[in-house]
């Protein structure tokens, strides 16, 4: 849906800056107070939590258009970290202006509510994956889920989606060991269902992958511009 000149001018005024970060760097550190919200403009990132011994759980992956840091609006410090998976560029928004946005641009406030609800939906799906899906189903779910998300924002060309994850990222997201993740990927590859090469993913037989993952593809509205 096109964005009007007035809304674009408001968004530009709302932003406090645009910045970049190289792959592997931290955008939001764990357990530190943050005064900003971010919109990912380009590249991939991920939200994560770590335990005292260094074990990491990736909560979800962030793609262009995703709003970052909204959860911290309700706590005194960040309850998770955000790390750049690739080189990223992002817009910064001062957190204290959030109420002004809801008051003066309620339709944009609704967009933020929609983004928060979608985030909750992703968390629900991730909980089902970690709690009840077996290893084959978990990996299948991750592949088709990220391919679909990339497709919806134009990151798929000739069937190939950007896929910058290494197996450690997949293991940390799915609650599997690195060895188990590797074995499961090889089992799926032998079935000829997908191809992974050079940071790209192609679904050779998406219907078979959907059946394995019990994926239900629901229509989704365009991610709003913020």
Image (cartoon, grey):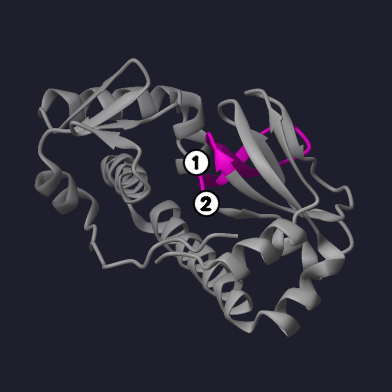
Q: Bin the neighbour count of mark 1 within 10 Å (Cα to Cα): few under 14, some 14-19, many 20 and up.
A: many
**Is residue 49 among what the camera can see?**
no
User: In terms of secondary structure, what is the magenta stretch mainly?
Assistant: strand
Element assignment for label 1: helix
| Residue 220 x, y percent position in the rendering | 33, 66
The residue positioned 34% from the left and 43% from the top of the image is 154
Horizontal side of residue 68 vs 94, given as left or right: left
Gap between marks 1 and 2 measured at Cα: 21 Å
Side (left or right) of 172 relative to 19:
left
Q: Is residue 36 magenta?
A: no
Q: Classify 198 as above or below 151.
A: above
Q: Is residue 45 magenta?
A: yes
| Image quadrant in which you'd find residue 209 | top left
- Residue 163, given in percent of the width and then of the height, sits at 38, 30
The number of discs equals: 2
Q: Indicate which disc residue 67 carries.
A: none
Does the rendering let one see residue 135?
Answer: yes
Categorize mark 2 by other alpha carbons within 10 Å: few (<14), some (14-19), many (20+).
some
Numbered range of the magenta stretch: 41-64
- Which of the 4 quarters of the picture holds residue 67? bottom right
Q: Which residue is mark 2?
A: 65
Say the numbered circle drawn on residue 173: 1
Q: Tell me which residue sits at (38%, 28%) in the image.
A: 180
The quadrant of the image that shows the C terminus is: bottom right
Picture layout, residue 217 above or below residue 114: above
């Amino acid at each position: 849906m096109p964005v009007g000149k007035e809304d674009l001018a408001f968004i530009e005024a709302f932003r406090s800056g645009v910045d970049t970060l190289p792959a592997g760097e931290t955008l939001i550190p764990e357990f530190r107070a943050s005064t900003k919200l971010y919109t990912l403009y380009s590249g991939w990132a991920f939200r994560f939590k770590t335990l005292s011994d260094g074990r990491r759980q990736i909560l979800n992956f962030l793609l262009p258009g995703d709003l970052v840091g909204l959860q911290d609006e309700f706590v005194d410090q960040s309850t998770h970290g955000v790390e750049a998976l690739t080189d990223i560029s992002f817009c910064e928004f001062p957190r204290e202006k959030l109420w002004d946005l809801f008051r003066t641009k309620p339709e944009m406030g609704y967009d933020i509510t929609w983004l928060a609800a979608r985030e909750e939906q992703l968390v629900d799906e991730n909980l089902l994956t970690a709690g009840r899906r077996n290893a084959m189903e978990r990996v299948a779910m991750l592949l088709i889920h990220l391919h679909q998300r990339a497709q919806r924002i134009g990151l798929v060309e000739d069937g190939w989606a950007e896929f910058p994850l290494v197996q450690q990222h997949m293991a940390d997201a799915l609650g599997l060991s690195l060895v188990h993740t590797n074995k499961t990927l090889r089992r799926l590859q032998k079935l000829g269902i997908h191809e992974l090469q050079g940071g790209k993913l192609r679904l050779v037989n998406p219907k078979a992958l959907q059946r394995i993952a019990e994926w239900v593809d629901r229509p989704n509205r365009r991610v709003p511009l913020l």
